[in-house]
Amino acid sequence: MALQEYQSFLSQNKTVSPTASKDAEMVRRVGNRIAGAVTAYMNQNNMGNQIAGYKWEFNLVDDKQVNAWCMPGGKVVVYTGLLPVTQNESALACVMGHEVAHAIARHGNERMSQGLVAQGIQIAGAVALNKNPQAQNIFMQAVGVGGPLGLMAYGRQNELEADHLGLIFMAMAGYNPNEAVPFWTRMANAGGGQKPPELLSTHPSDDRRIAQLQKLMPEAMKYYKPQGR
């Protein structure tokens, strides 16, 4: 379903060519480095079979939304509206590591299953699933397509888990994990103080997220080996 919906999304949106855009080339470069780090991490932890069927793909889409997402199977999109907030390659690696971590931890799969149950949808077989418009909408929401980064799809625990794994992935890819704190600070400021209190939200408060990132930083730095750009 991810492959079908990803191809459909790209056909309906303006994809930026990496041969014509340094930003699109950067997205692909960072993505490939993150993918290599994920493969190494999963193999080191005897979980390589969980990503055996992944066929990584990274695309920049011309859209003002401050968003990025990764579908199951390694299908990633970054929106051009995110780049003014990331500001640099390491911060972009932070976001992409975070979104890939959601897919690796199968958070989208969990949300998809919960959504189907909540809507009372019982589907036998992948073919029937792909042909069900309601199931397709649930899937797109489950992986975070269609809304601002950090405001869609995932709950507090999933977000914090993705932060943890994302730091490790970006560090293993050769990007300084310390860039995560200023990035999420910029994201908090970009929100304009309009977010609800953590107790009323499914997502961690900005203060809690940043505090956890700082707590996890010593572990992440153990994986960090700078690479030439």
Image (tube, grey):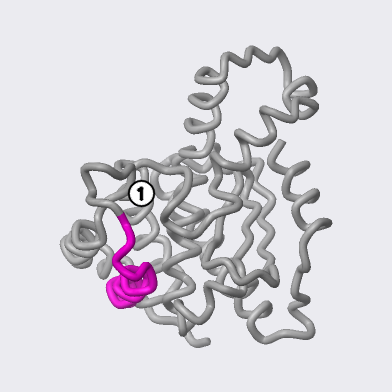
Name the residue rendered at 61%, 68% in the picture.
79
Please name the residue shown 29% across and 66% down the image: 193
Residue closest to the eye, 149 or 73: 149
Q: Residue at x 79, y 23 (%)?
A: 127
Tell me which residue sits at (74%, 78%) in the image: 18
Q: Quadrant of residue 1?
A: top right
**Horizontal placement of 86 versus 204: left or right?**
right
Residue 13 appears left or right of 64: right
Q: Amino acid at mark 1?
A: Glu
The foreground one among 61 and 202 is 202
Is 85 above or below relative to 94? Answer: below
Q: Is residue 187 magenta?
A: yes
**Any magenta on residue 91?**
no
Image location (x, y in percent) of residue 96: 50, 63
- Seen as rendered, the residue at the extreme right is 11
Residue indicated by mark 1 = 159
Write down the region rendered in magenta: 178-195
- The image shows residue 88 at horizontal and vertical percentages of 46, 84
Q: Position of residue 191 (x, y in %)?
A: 37, 67
Task: Residue 177: tell me if it is visible.
Answer: no
x, y (%) of residue 158? Answer: 36, 43
